[in-house]
Amino acid sequence: MSLIKTDKLSFDYIRRDEEGNVEAIVRAVDEVSLDIEQGDFIAILGHNGSGKSTFSKHLNAILMPTEGTVWVDGKDTGDSDNLWAIRETAGMVFQNPDNQIIGQIVEEDVGFGPENLGVETKEIWQRVEESLKAVGMWEYRKHSPNKLSGGQKQRVSIAGVLAMHPKCIVLDEPTAMLDPNGRYEVIRAARALNEVEKVTVILITHYMEEVIFADKVFVMDKGHIAMQGTPREIFSRVEELKAIHLDVPQVTMLAHELKKRGLNIPDGILTTEELVEALKKIR
Amino acid sequence: MLRDITLGQYYQADSVLHRLDPRVKLIGTIAYIIALFMCTNVWGYLAVTVFLCSIIVISKVPVKFMLKGMKAILFLIIITVCFNMFMTQGEVLVSFWRLKITKEGLIVAAKMAIRLSYLIIGSSLMTLTTTPNQLTDGLEKLLGPLKKIHMPVHEIAMMMSIALRFIPILMEETDKIMKAQMARGANFDTGNIFQKAKSLVPLLVPLFISAFRRANDLAMAMEARCYKGGESRTKMKPLKYQGRDIAGYLILVGFVAAVVATRWIP
């Protein structure tokens, strides 16, 4: 069975007035069914308000589906007995690095998760060391998180989740508040986890450049899955992406425009090197 | 940089006192304060002074850091001294207008001044040699037995450490909001006290909103990391008594006994 499976998952935000009467119901996620296999690097794309963050919060039972079901590692998230097991299986990194670091020293923050799981003191230290080394923050273990850069803070947050030994890490727009350098650091750390530690990574983002390494991309729009496929398949459909207010990476756009003007270039160019190769062939 | 401020007033140094278990230091401070108020004669004060001086030497903290804490209560000491000096009845030494300074008054005032300043120096020694984190850990462990009567000890300790973590962040945020408001013509510095207080409203409102948002985010992040309260939680840095901590307790017992003993010295 796949690691994560959702079946017709829907979620409503209900706004109530002061007396508690329902004022408005907003359907944030609408009948999403998908499968995520163990070991994959998955990207979920979507512009603001597409429901991607709401969807991601279902993956470790922070939100419960209004309709439909989510299974994480075969466990139904709607069953409250499964709550802690699910959160142990699927870790989560949030957008704002300042608001998710609990410890006053880097190593204490990474130890927070294992402490909650009731891991032995000696093993906590082992896990902290492994996790900090995996994200390249071991030298900063004695620092105060307040003195780190945004990218470093997010890597500490990733280490904090990693120390809980999850099967899967959900990164909910981890780079939205970072500068380009920090974004690069975080994405590199996430890819390393996937390739070296074999952790399933689910990256929620609206930056196109970050998804080109993914094994599979889901594009969300208005709560639905609008497209799914490999990055190459997705980026071949430039016009459709534009219709749902998503940009494609610059090279892909350039290749697309050149093709429209009659040059013989394949669809779904993802990197500058690929475009260079394609252009060389034409000459 | 606002983010560089150290909370409490921890002074980084490598001394036995710094390495001592926070529980020993907490209990020690309480024992010290009790001993201080049990002194009845010169010998008692002498014992306390010797103890305090040796602790200061051991701590390797410069004396001026301790005197800093004194500044805050200087006013309080002056008032106490004045009241004791003039209000105590007894053998009149000097008198002018309607005020009389008595011999007994002078003695009581001197005793009060010594007690208050020793109290401040002693307790600031504890905060100077213990990180806020160790303090909360120590408190949690010491108050542990109160869990039996349903005191949320772990929760209180957790709140304290989260507050400590977020104070610098919120201070930076205050600074940011203040600058943003100033850029749009807000004035925080002029006017009388009421106008100043009123000008803080546009600062406090966004600060509160952001603090609540942060609290919400943090709660979600903690839950996502399986935080479920103090039950069945293990510690990354558990407090364990070492040889030096036992020695510390023994010295404390000796000190209190010595001070109590001075009460029988005429």
Image (tube, rainbow, N blue to C red):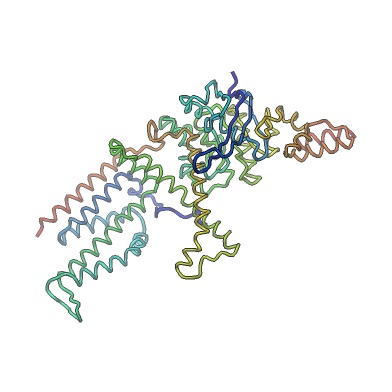
Question: In the rendered image, which quarter contains the N terminus of chain A?
Answer: top right
Which of A35 and A105 lies nearest the eye of the viewer? Answer: A35
In this rendering, position of residue B138 left or right of residue B92: right
Examine the rendering and report whether any part of residue B172 can be seen. no
Q: How many marks?
A: 0
Residue B94, position as x, y percentages in the image: 17, 78
Which of B252 and A51 lies nearest the eye of the viewer? Answer: A51
Work out whether B174 lies above or below B226: below
Which of B194 and A81 lies nearest the eye of the viewer? Answer: B194
Q: Quadrant of residue A197?
A: top right
Work out whether B251 lies above or below B85: above
In this rendering, position of residue B75 left or right of residue B38: right
Which of A211 and B149 lies nearest the eye of the viewer? Answer: B149
- Tell which residue pokes out farthest to the top in this image: A1
Residue A72, position as x, y percentages in the image: 55, 24
In this rendering, position of residue A222 left or right of residue B167: right
Residue A83, position as x, y percentages in the image: 48, 27
Residue B82, position as x, y percentages in the image: 24, 71
- Residue at 22% over, 64% down: B112
- Residue at 57% over, 60% down: B181
Question: In the rendered image, which quarter contains the C terminus of chain A?
Answer: top right
- Residue at 23% over, 57% down: B50
Examine the rendering and report whether any part of residue B201 can be seen. yes
In this rendering, position of residue B72 left or right of residue A151: left
